[in-house]
Image: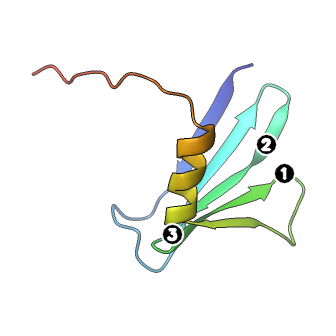
Amino acid sequence: MAHEVTLDIATKFVLNKDVKIFVKTTDGKLGTVLVSKGNVEWVPSGNHVNKKRLSWTQFAELMEVHGSDVKIKKKTA
């Protein structure tokens, strides 16, 4: 299943507006990730009332527990 990820980013820094990341699959939209200075939020597709919110500390803990280990590629000059 391929994913399409697009960004709605107005500036290079997260200031007073969230950075919006739209996530789609070949089957349709999965949802939108909202990135802010204070937290990260998930708005599932079709849901315009409720969103899921994690602080950056909670997000880091979630990734430590549920994230898969992947080697970091070294940058070449």
Q: Secondary structure at mark 2?
A: strand
Q: Amino acid at mark 2?
A: Leu
Q: To which quarter of the image does residue 54 belong?
A: bottom right
The residue under label 2 is 30
Rendered location of residue 18, percent (x, y): 54, 69
Give me the C-alpha separation between circle 1 and circle 2.
5 Å
- Left or right of residue 77, residue 63 in this image: right
Q: Amino acid at mark 1?
A: Ser
Give me the C-alpha separation between circle 3 and circle 1.
20 Å
Give me the C-alpha separation between circle 2 and circle 3.
20 Å
Pair 3/1: label in front: 3
The answer to whether marks 1 and 2 mark residues whose Cβ atoms lie closer than 8 Å is yes
The residue under label 1 is 45
Q: Residue at x 64, y 32 (%)?
A: 4
Colour setup of the view: rainbow
Q: Nearer the viewer, residue 57 or 21?
A: 57
Q: Amino acid at mark 3?
A: Ser
Q: Is residue 22 above or below residue 38?
A: above
Rendered location of residue 19, percent (x, y): 52, 62
